[in-house]
Image (cartoon, helix red, strand yellow):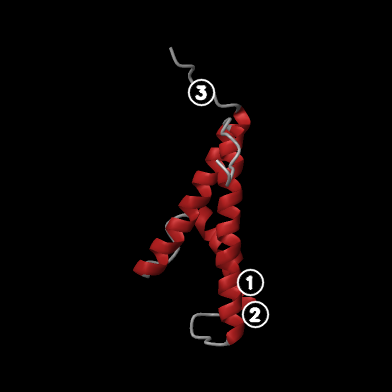
Amino acid sequence: MRNAIKLTRFAQYAWGVLAYNLAVILWGAYVRATGSGAALSLTFIIIESLVGAGLVLFKLVAYDDSLARVYAISAHLVNTFLMLASLALTAWWASGGKRLSVYS
């Protein structure tokens, strides 16, 4: 008989945070791809406007083809991927996942 995995409250929270962040990213991609605007969800509007405000504040908007925008968007994407990796590893380890090793 196998033991069922019982997630602690922290592990459940960690998986929830990861799922929420993935939903925010997917929603942003959907809004951008369809051009439908961000008026469909208040939560996503607030998060997207905080990110968008920074880009607008520094005038790194859609029609800006400057090198500064290239660096800003690249830094944003790298930061997003690092954040998702950190959230995924936190959820994995909180759930009792084994340590990752390159020498396995």
Look at 58% across and 30% down and name the residue there.
96
Residue lying at the far top in this picture: please name it.
1
Question: Which kind of residue does numbered mark 3 sit on?
Answer: Ile
Q: State the image coordinates of residue 73 (x, y, percent, origin top left).
A: 56, 73
Identify residue for label 3. Answer: 5
Q: Are marks 2 and 1 in contact (CB under 8 Å)?
A: yes
Vertical placement of residue 1 versus 53, above or below: above
Q: State the image coordinates of residue 48 (x, y, percent, origin top left).
A: 54, 62
Look at 43% across and 57% down and name the residue there.
27
Q: Are marks 1 and 3 in contact (CB under 8 Å)?
A: no
Look at 63% across and 71% down and name the residue there.
54
**Which label sits in the foreground, 2 or 3?**
3
Identify residue for label 1. Answer: 54
Look at 48% across and 57% down and name the residue there.
25
Vertical placement of residue 58 versus 32, above or below: below
Q: Is residue 88 left or right of residue 40?
A: right
- In the picture, the disc for residue 91 is none
* Label 1 secondary element: helix
Pointer 3 local density, CA inside 10 Å: few below 14, some 14–19, many at least 20: few
Tell me the distance, in whole angstroms, between the alpha carbons under discs 1 and 3: 42 Å
Q: Nearer the viewer, residue 96 or 37?
A: 96
Identify residue for label 2. Answer: 58
